[in-house]
Image (cartoon, rainbow, N blue to C red):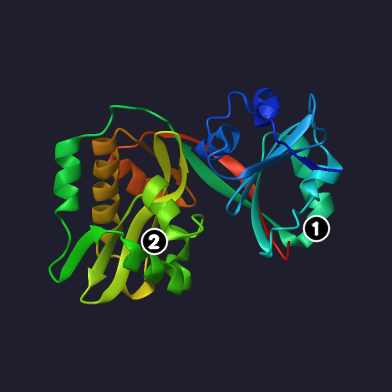
Amino acid sequence: MAVKLEKREAAQELFINWPEMLITSCLQGVMGDIYADQAECPRSAMARLGDFCFLAGEPDPELVCFKPAEWKKNFTIMVPQHEGWWHLIRECYGEKAKQVTRYAFLKEKDVFDRKRLMEAADSLPPGYQMQLIDEALYERCLAEEWSRDLVAQYPEYQTYAKMGLGVAVLKGEELAAGASSYASFWNGIEIEIDTKMKYRRQGLAFACGARLILECLDRGWYPSWDAQNLWSVGLAKKLGYHYDHAYTAFEIWGY
């Protein structure tokens, strides 16, 4: 039976040497939760934040099949620490589990070229404008499916204003793209970038991504990046990140 850890540090050793900032946020108690096979000296643990679920330690069939009561969505992304978890994920979820490849980037400070980022932020095509996400834009992000993940992990604007950060690109009065914090950790954020379908391939993600990184640097925050696909890999490299490695994850539909 999975238990939610009140003392999150009990699972610290299970996640050691896993430089994933969503896990860090969970361990810090900033966002997300950690579940384990037992409260004291756990052997297996799950860090859950947003759509993501990270499985560490000894493979545990009860933990991999566990769904918290408060989790209402029918989708999650499971990231196994090692191959031992793969078998259990497939066994528990069968055809619901789609194996995918994601891409990690090095967590490096002082690698960003401010001049290049300023040029990128100024490359917004004519007819568009960019501004920080305020309360009105926070609500507008939540109103559409494509932009919801820009702010959805923060339960209300006051929490977002305190912990999060983001910029939006507008075409007239229409929200066209945004770069924002998917989640927060101490002195940093995990970046989420989305563009409305009809506005893609115009350089909006590049411009607002650069602006968000600059805003983070001005605050002394680290802008962490993890890529879902090769397009995101290319964008990250253009913005100054250095590629680390590919890793396996499972998208669970009908969770």
Question: Can I make out residue 231 in this image?
Answer: no
Q: Residues within 10 Å of mark 2 (few under 14, many from 20)?
A: many
- Label 2 or label 1, whichever lies nearer to me, is 2
Secondary structure under tag 2 reads strand
N-terminal of the pair, mark 2 or mark 1, is: 1
Q: Which residue is mark 2?
A: 194
Q: Quadrant of the C terminus?
A: bottom right
Query: Who's the residue at 41% across and 45% down the image?
Result: 163
Say whether marks 2 and 1 touch (CB < 8 Å): no
* Residue type beneath disc 2: Asp
Q: Which residue is mark 1?
A: 94
Q: Position of residue 93 (x, y in %)?
A: 79, 56
Q: Is residue 202 above or below residue 187?
A: below
Query: Who's the residue at 25% across and 47% down the image?
Result: 210
* Residue type beneath disc 1: Gly
Q: Is residue 142 above or below residue 45?
A: below
Q: Quadrant of the N terminus?
A: top right
Q: Quote the CA–CA distance across marks 2 and 1.
A: 30 Å
Question: Can I make out residue 22 in this image?
Answer: yes
